[in-house]
Amino acid sequence: MCDDQRRNFHLLSFTCSLTSLTVLEGTWARLAQVRQPHPKCLDGTWVDLLNYIHDLLDDPKNNQFIWLHHDGTAGVGKSAFAFTSLKVAEEMNVEKRLAGEHFFSRASTPNTAQLDISLRHLFTILPPIFQASGRM
Amino acid sequence: MNRAIHINPAPDIRRCPPLSFIVNVLDECTSESELTELILSFARVLREPDFPVIHILLTSRSESHICKAFQNEEVHPLACEIPVKTSGVGVATIISLDCVDVDNDIYISLQYSFRELSWLEIISSFPY
């Protein structure tokens, strides 16, 4: 990519990100409404884990997968675990940094079809070079 | 009529705080092959050299097909694992519930529950 292309790409992707976030904000508000009242981890709890995740999410340089997983044994705190992720999503949404969110559920969203809608929204607004690299 | 259009120069997206995409409960996806394909697709997109910085937070049970997908050579270098366990010594990337001081969490939880109860008491004593 030459400098001009790179500059244009940055401008385009920045504009797209803002548009995307505005649309997603509406989606998030509707989702949050549907899920009300939803349990979540209380303010002031799971602080170490939340700080650890936020430090990773704030990394401005390297793209990364952050994979939070548990072995499913009793008492591992599976509910608190789920609420932690919900809390992270809420905080990212407040900071206008939530590009999208998806919940898999055997009952209602057991496959990737619905996730594809969110991903299409995120990636197809980016320049074609990125559309070619994904499944979209 | 001529209107002057002022366009503020957009800041470089790389100077903005990175965006996050969150996918919860991967193990509820019933198709193992679809899920593996999804994780690989994410990895391919994240590896694009000019892609704006974006982090993908994934949560799941540590099921074997998901662990295998994360061991893939395209995925592994990008992955930052946070295993949550009930026991064991915590190392840098492991949050072990045994090693975390949970007293404060329990205190906050009880305080919240008692507050809820006191509200119920006020409502139930309301004269109808």
Image: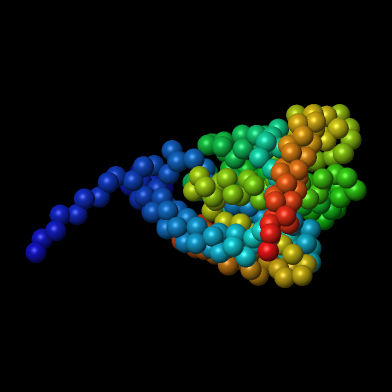
Nearest the viewer among B76 and A22 is A22
* Figure quadrant of the C terminus of chain A: bottom right
* In-image side of A11 versus B44 (left or right): left
Query: How far across and down, in percent of the image, does residue A135 sit?
Result: 60, 64
Residue located farthest toward the left when viewing the structure as drawn: B1
Residue A8 visible (yes or no): yes
Rendering quarter of residue B28: bottom right
- Residue ID at (36%, 42%): B11
Position of A29 relative to B70 (above/below): below
Query: How far across and down, in percent of the image, does residue B19 sit?
Result: 53, 47
* In-image side of A39 versus A24 (left or right): right
Query: How far across and down, in percent of the image, does residue A133 sit?
Result: 56, 58
Query: How far across and down, in percent of the image, does residue A83 sit?
Result: 71, 49
* In-image side of B99 versus B16 (left or right): right
- Residue ID at (21%, 50%): B6
* In-image side of B62 versus B54 (left or right): right
Nearest the viewer among A19 and A35 is A35
Residue located farthest toward the front when viewing the structure as drawn: B127
